[in-house]
Image (cartoon, helix red, strand yellow):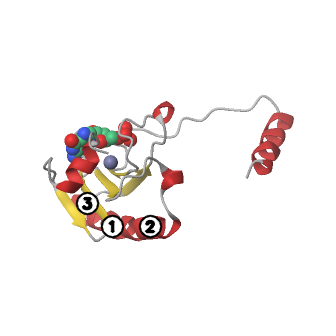
Amino acid sequence: MDECIFCKIVKGDIPCAQVYADEKIIAFLDIAPISKGHTLIIPKVHYENLWEVPEDLGNDILRAMQKIGNGILKATGAQGLNVVMNNFPAAGQVIPHAHWHLIPRFKGDGLFKIVQGKYDSNDEIMALADKIKNNI
Ligand code: 5GP
Ligand code: ZN
């Protein structure tokens, strides 16, 4: 993955403001933050998206996310923290190296929220739930 920006950051070829590193994971500040303290957590090995990340590494990432999230909350004084992972371009994934965004939030900051929509009918929601269930 010679061209991957995040692999270059892991190798030290591109500088970053690193906040955490262990054997398998690094975390650094996003260069274009949604809010100050916006941090990216990535596996050192190049996996493209959620489904490529092995289960044991997923556990390590979750634990690191809890530790780093605490650090971000304390350092920024934020009252909340969004954890966002974009998978595939349709979901806004620009860098095809799996990563999790940790975004500090303050009450009333108005940055973003989940936009709520609706189903046309109860039949539609029940049928879709069944369809998803049958595909798991
Ligand atoms: P995505 O849209 O793929 O989920 O998010 C990629 C993120 O990587 C963006 O928020 C972007 O600002 C950040 N980013 C892109 N290039 C660099 C870089 O060279 N250094 C750092 N620290 N962040 C980057
Ligand atoms: Zn990579």
Q: Give the mark nearest the N terminus, 1 or 2.
A: 1
Tell me the mark number nearer the camera, choosing from 3 and 1: 1
Classify 80 as above or below 49: below
Q: What element carries label 2?
A: helix
The image quadrant where one finds ligand 1 is: top left
Disc with the residue nearer the chain's start (3 vs 1): 1
Q: In the image, residue 84 lies at what x, y percent?
A: 43, 48
User: Which residue matches tag 2?
Assistant: 57
The circle on residue 102 is none
Q: Which amino acid does label 2 sit on?
A: Leu
Q: Which mark is residue 24?
A: 1
Q: Do the residues labelled 3 and 2 touch (CB within 8 Å)?
A: no
- Residue at image location 48% in from the left, 70% down from the top: 56
Q: Mark 3 points at which residue?
A: 77
- Asked whether the viewer can see residue 9, the reply is yes
Q: Nearer the viewer, residue 132 or 115?
A: 132
